Image: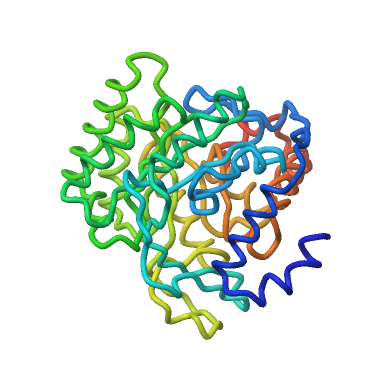
Amino acid sequence: MLFRLLRPALFALDPETGHRLALAGLKALPARAPMPIQAALKIEVAGLAFPNPVGVAAGFDKDAEVPDQLLDLGFGFAEVGSITPLPQAGNPKPRLFRLVEDRAVINRMGFNNQGAEAALERLRARARAERGGIVGVNIGANKDAADRVADYARMTEVMAPVASYLCVNISSPNTPGLRALQDEGALTELLDAVMAARAKAMPSGAPPVFLKVAPDLEPADVDAIARIAIDKGLGALVVSNTTITRPALRSHHAKETGGLSGAPLKALALQRLRDFRKATGGTIPLVGVGGIASAEDAWERIRAGASLVQLYSAMVYEGPGLGARIARGLIPLMHRDGFASIAEAVGSE
């Protein structure tokens, strides 16, 4: 209710200012007990015990400023980032657009963040405070890096000790040439470097590695990525990032360049999830992202093969309490369809 009262004022501001105010508001929240864990919602993925399958996607908390506040709100996990080795300002403004009529967002942020050192100190501080909960770290490469593979390896080595899992982001459309790392040869080289860096940083007890892919893939790309992910022993595939395609949109921002997310991405992201479920044969966990705004959306993604789901753009329109509402809403859907746990339902469609 509070968010609904504040939303007109937030929407009167430019989106980036509104986002910064949202982060400031979360920082100001008093500490609270997390949502009680319900056994039916618990699920194990890549050796990690998630209290519920609903998480915050990367991009909301780029600099690891509020992961614990998000967990306290009822999210089962939070993914911070994308974080690059060096700070970078990102692309020129304006670069973030609300498409209110479409319940969507277009962004061309360009991995703007304060860099690895700043995020690392915050994550070390929460470790010293013995904060629990699952906090993944989404890693990227600097735009002007001479060797992007080396950037990912460096980020792996730095962040492995403070991350519940690492998510390798090669699917943002806003860093020129980044998506080329999804090509079979480039992806193999990249993941070999990441795995070697992880072993160097943590010879034992290393966090699992997730890979975030684009929705704009051809069938041959899906098959190749699935094969490599299985071969390299990845912890999960995150399906998917924003799209550069443009379905029918009503907003006057429809022609802005960048990645489209929110409701118009739903059908494409769901289809790509089904494609990866088929290509992997269910041998690797999948994280469903894109256009999830309700318990029904999350349930559809779980039935299609997602062990976990993530959201971000829907929070622009529904507020940060959406994660807890979705998690709670999954329970009656499970009962309706005859499942006793989330794990039972994964891929059941």
Residue drawn at x 61%, y 25% is 129
Residue drawn at x 56%, y 26% is 44
Name above or below for residue 245 compared with residue 128.
Answer: below
Residue drawn at x 16%, y 43% is 185
Name above or below for residue 29 compared with residue 217.
Answer: above
Q: Position of residue 143 (x, y in %)?
A: 27, 56
Name above or below for residue 4 compared with residue 240.
Answer: below
Q: Position of residue 287 (x, y in %)?
A: 50, 42
Mark yes or no: residue 181 visible: yes
Residue drawn at x 65%, y 58% is 22
Tell me if 223 is positioned left or right of 106 in this view. left
| On-image quarter of the N terminus | bottom right
Tell me if 292 is positioned left or right of 224 in this view. right
The quarter of the picture where residue 158 lies is top left
Q: Position of residue 135 (x, y in %)?
A: 54, 35
The quarter of the picture where residue 309 lies is top right
| On-image quarter of the C terminus | top right
Mark yes or no: residue 303 visible: no
Q: Position of residue 57 (x, y in %)?
A: 53, 49
Between 186 and 135, which is closer to the camera in this rendering?
135
Residue lying furthest bottom in this view?
252
Between 309 and 276, which is closer to the camera in this rendering?
309
Residue lying furthest right in this view?
1
